[in-house]
Image (cartoon, grey):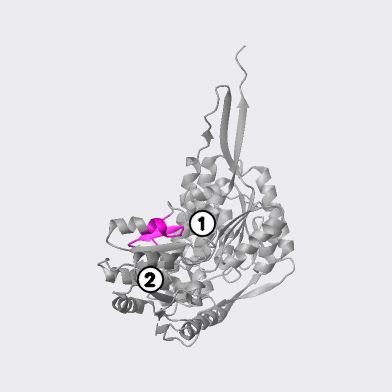
Amino acid sequence: MKTQQEWLELKDRLQIETNAFINGEYCPAINGQRFEVVNPATNESIAEVAQCTQEDVNIAVKAARQAFHSGEWSDSAPEHRKRILSQFSALIEQNKEELALLETLDTGKPIDHSFSTDIPGSASAIRWYAEAIDKCYGEVATTERDVHAFISHQPVGVVAAVVPWNFPLWIACWKLGPALAAGCSVILKPSEKSSLTAIYLGKLANQAGLPKGVFQVVTGYGHEAGDALATHSDVDCITFTGSTKVAGQLMVSSGESNLKRVWAEAGGKNANIVFDDYEDLDHAAEAAAAGCFYNQGEVCVAATRLLVHESIKDQFIDKVLSAAQRFQPKDPLDPSSCMGSLIDQQHKDKVEQYIKLGVEEGALLRGGEQTLEHGAFVSPCILDNVDNSMRVAQEEIFGPVLCVIPFKTEQQAIEIANDSKYGLGAALWTDNINRAHRVAKKLEAGTVWVNNYNEGDMTVPFGGFKMSGNGRDKSIHAIEKFTETKTTWIRLQPNQ
């Protein structure tokens, strides 16, 4: 890991690419317009990125369709795709320092997280799907004697991957890995708040040997470039991570265009339940703090609702407050920083308004002291004695705000946890194996953790119930999102 001074020196040498990547080449938007990229930790302008619109999207989709129909990638042997994607993954690893620095400058997240977690996780996702390519098989149906029926999976076509700003490259690679492995052509549309690492991938794709048009990056605003992809009748599938509101809009756009597949991973208001029979409260408190405050709380599956049995609540909150001390905001380029800035000043204002609202609704504020004058920094905040009907308990804040809700019985904890329009993640802490299984089965969430929070790897699917979305990222199940299932029924002629 570099020192803070070494990161600053690399920043001064860094050449930032700011154009879209279309049909194998970097190019400005046709209209010549650009939008400003601001480092949220310093308010410094660091780049101006191509502001693509409908015209640029049309060119990208045409190139993606031509590449798909050419068969150079879509019809290529699994071993060929495996080799190219493995090289793509290796190049991400080899360029880890530049990618990590771009991610931190763009989003304000700590450089240690970018360098040690986000970028290696991105490379790992691509590598995992490269290895999975030649391990996916079709099926033969059990039919009558004179019929041979088999089920095969073929790539869906042109995929638009619309990704968020909290884990820009990592979540992008969750989408790119299975879509490219399936043989699709992919157009990546990063958030306008975090485009730099996506753009950087373009040259790595060329170096890895991905054919022109198979991987492209269209930068711009959601209401322009994003909407153009959502309504385009030659886009076959949209894979999306972001807000529930935008997920709904994408489904409307699908219905009004060509019924393209829409796979959405949306919001969360996740319950972390601590029962009074769990003995290692220090461990649970460390996990509760990290589960809510990691990545500045800008995590869809953050443990933002802490449900604690009333008999241990006060004791447990003191332990969480102590654990939260390591998440005090620092300069993101300081390698010792565990908490950087929020994505921008506007989002900081929104988070602070929620804290104020929680107090007005009757919650008790503990923590939340401001430590830095400049930049979009917010310190960890605990709102105690929250009622689950309060807005701070029902709405996704997407910041370092932990809502503590007491409960009396197991059934009450389950009811509170499920009393949400979201169903992304949930956790419970107990030393009773019967309770662990009993409660886990009843929690309405795509992932339930027992005696841990947000652990996992590429082997398990990730996604939610209810308004947290549909479909799944990660695991072999994600490849299914980017294929069409085809039945071929052959009537065998009897031997004459």
Secondary structure of residue under mark 2: strand
Q: Does 398 sit left or right of 412 as displayed? A: right
**Which residue is the site of mark 1?**
174
From this view, report whether residue 256 is shown above or below residue 143: below
- Residue at 29%, 56% (x, y): give it: 433
Q: Residues within 10 Å of mark 2 (few under 14, many from 20)?
A: many
Residue 364 percent coordinates (x, y):
40, 84
Kind of residue at badge 2: Leu
Instruction: Assess whether mark 1 and mark 2 are in contact (beta carbons under 8 angstroms).
Output: no
Residue 181 percent coordinates (x, y):
54, 47
The magenta-colored residue range is 439-457
Residue 334 percent coordinates (x, y):
41, 77
Residue 407 visible somewhere in the drawing: yes
Quick one: 168 or 253, which is closer to the camera? Answer: 253
Residue 338 visible somewhere in the drawing: no
Q: CA distance from mark 2 to mark 1?
A: 31 Å
Q: Is residue 452 magenta?
A: yes
**Which residue is the site of mark 2?**
307
Residue 138 percent coordinates (x, y):
53, 37
- Residue at 31%, 68% (x, y): give it: 284
Q: Residues within 10 Å of mark 1 (few under 14, many from 20)?
A: many
Kind of residue at badge 1: Trp
Q: Quadrant of the N terminus?
A: bottom left
